[in-house]
Image (cartoon, helix red, strand yellow):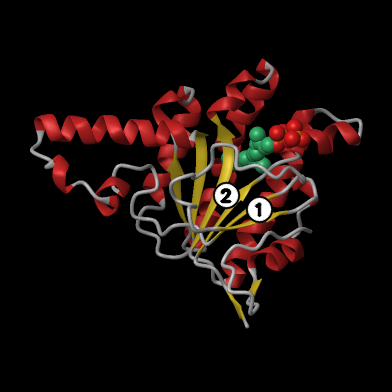
């Protein structure tokens, strides 16, 4: 028996290596990755997935060469300029998980506009993890919980998982059922560590620009086995 997950989270790894292996720049690899990402968004609507979270930029990524960081920060501007009319037609809602205030102004404006324009859409939610770190997310949640306890009467003794989740960037979203990572590395890399505590992990060898709709569908569909195990590693 196979089931379609509600929330799929994707670590889009391998763009830089893909570019280099073709004698191109790392940024050209990110451009190719953006094209693959568009296919995965299409596949998600085709498969009836409700939420797709895409790891687009981690707080660690600021350490990359300036040219590459600038290119990665320009991508959302171009992408949303081009794709927003289509997302409106397709009823796709854009969310951002991450420190939006820490983004360059033009990038922040572009993502805030995308969220604002699509906020009433009721179809697929595409949630971009941008300037995201799971540890920072948990820490900022703790700061805000403590502030609400001090200033707004939040009863710390009543704090539970349901309340705490409201302080995370992903508030209101279901937990991911599956986390997929392309590019061959078997690591979680500070991604959705609270939210994916029950998620199936799926590691795929293909570099992200080579990650096709077919590989995506293969990765999201869990063949139930009589093993009694809820975690199953999968390889491409
Ligand atoms: C990791 O690959 C990938 C990224 C840091 C960026 C991923 C971003 C996209 C695919 C597009 C985002 C687009 C928008 C519109 C938000 P890597 O470069 O670390 O790969 P490597 O392991 O080969 O070095």
| Disc 2 secondary structure class | helix
Most extreme residue toward the bottom, as rendered? 1
> What residue is drawn where x is 49% and y is 34%?
133
Give x and y (percent) for residue 118: 41, 53
Quadrant placement of the C terminus: bottom right
Q: Is residue 169 left or right of residue 210?
A: left
In the image, residue 18 sits, relative to residue 197, either above or below, namely: above
Give x and y (percent) for residue 80: 54, 43
Q: Is residue 13 left or right of residue 126?
A: right
Q: Is residue 99 visible?
A: no
Quadrant placement of the N terminus: bottom right
Neighbours of disc 1 within 10 Å: few (<14), some (14-19), many (20+): some
Q: Which residue is mark 1?
A: 38
Beta carbon at label 2 within 8 Å of ligand 1: no
Give x and y (percent) for residue 60: 58, 26
Q: Which residue is mark 2?
A: 83
Q: Are marks 2 and 1 in contact (CB under 8 Å)?
A: yes
The answer for how far apart the CA atoms under marks 2 and 1 are is 10 Å
| Disc 1 secondary structure class | helix
Beta carbon at label 1 within 8 Å of ligand 1: no
Give x and y (percent) for residue 92: 48, 59
Q: Is residue 27 visible?
A: yes
């Amino acid at each position: 028996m196979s089931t379609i997950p509600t929330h799929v989270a994707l670590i889009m790894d391998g763009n830089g290596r893909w570019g280099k292996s073709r004698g191109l720049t790392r940024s050209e690899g990110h451009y190719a990755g953006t094209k693959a990402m568009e296919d995965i968004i299409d596949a998600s609507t085709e498969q009836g997935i409700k939420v797709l979270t895409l790891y687009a930029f981690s707080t660690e990524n600021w350490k990359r060469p300036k040219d590459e960081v600038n290119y990665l920060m320009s991508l959302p501007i171009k992408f949303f300029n081009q794709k927003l009319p289509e997302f409106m037609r397709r009823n796709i809602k854009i969310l951002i998980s991450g420190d939006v205030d820490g983004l360059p102004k033009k990038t922040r404006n572009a993502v805030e506009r995308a969220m604002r324009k699509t906020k009433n859409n009721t179809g697929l939610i595409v949630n971009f993890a941008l300037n995201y770190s799971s540890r920072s997310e948990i820490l900022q949640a703790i700061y805000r919980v403590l502030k609400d306890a001090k200033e707004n009467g939040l009863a710390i003794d009543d704090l539970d998982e349901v309340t705490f989740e409201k302080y995370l960037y992903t508030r209101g979203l279901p937990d991911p059922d599956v986390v997929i990572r392309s590019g061959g590395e078997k690591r979680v890399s500070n991604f959705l560590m609270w939210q994916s505590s029950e998620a199936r992990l799926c590691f795929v060898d293909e570099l992200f620009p080579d990650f096709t709709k077919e590989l995506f569908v293969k990765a999201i569909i869990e063949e139930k086995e009589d093993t009694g195990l809820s975690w199953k590693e999968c390889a491409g």
